[in-house]
Amino acid sequence: MARLDISERQMSDVTVLDLSGDITFGEGNVLLRAEIRRLLAEGRNKIFLNFARVEYLDSSGIGELVSGFTAVSRENGKLKFLNLPPRIYQLLAITKLLTVFDVAETAAEASAETSCDARELSTR
């Protein structure tokens, strides 16, 4: 089974989740859901998901992204996607979800609307 690893780092008032692996049915989408819900329960509602090392996203992964976006929005928070690989970018474009999600191509672009420094958000 494909695996998703998530590492967390704090940049000012933004929490960055560096994702590595696959966001798929089973472990991947459940782990992502748990991490987003945990952050919200702790009052951390500015969350950036760094997709630089995500290899695959299936339909349940897409569903979890929508669910996470909804949960963060309900808490008056901000969920941004960083460094989308071309295949995932195309998938979100085909499904018209790029018009819903807040996607940044670079860390500098993502930090422009937040209080964190772009150098802190660089890809690992």
Image: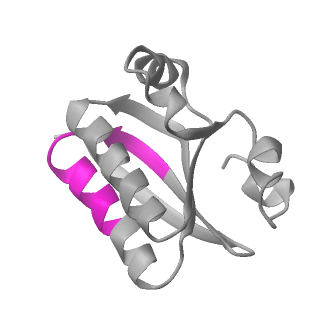
* Stretch in magenta: 19-35
x and y percentages locating residue 40 in the rendered image: 43, 75
Depth check, front residue: 100 or 57: 100
Residue 28 covered by magenta stretch: yes
- Left or right for 55, reference 62: right
Name the residue rendered at 41%, 14% in the picture: 94
In the depicted structure, whether residue 79 falls above or below residue 88: below
Image quadrant of residue 30?
bottom left
Q: Residue at x 53, y 77 (%)?
A: 44
Report x, y in % for residue 97.
Answer: 44, 29
What residue is at 47 percent from the left and 60 percent from the top?
A: 73
Residue at position x 37%, y 45% in the image: 65
Coloring basis for residues: one colour
Q: Nearer the viewer, residue 119 or 41?
A: 41
Magenta segment includes 123: no
Q: On screen, 14 above or below 29? A: below
Q: Classify residue 23 by image quadrant.
A: top left
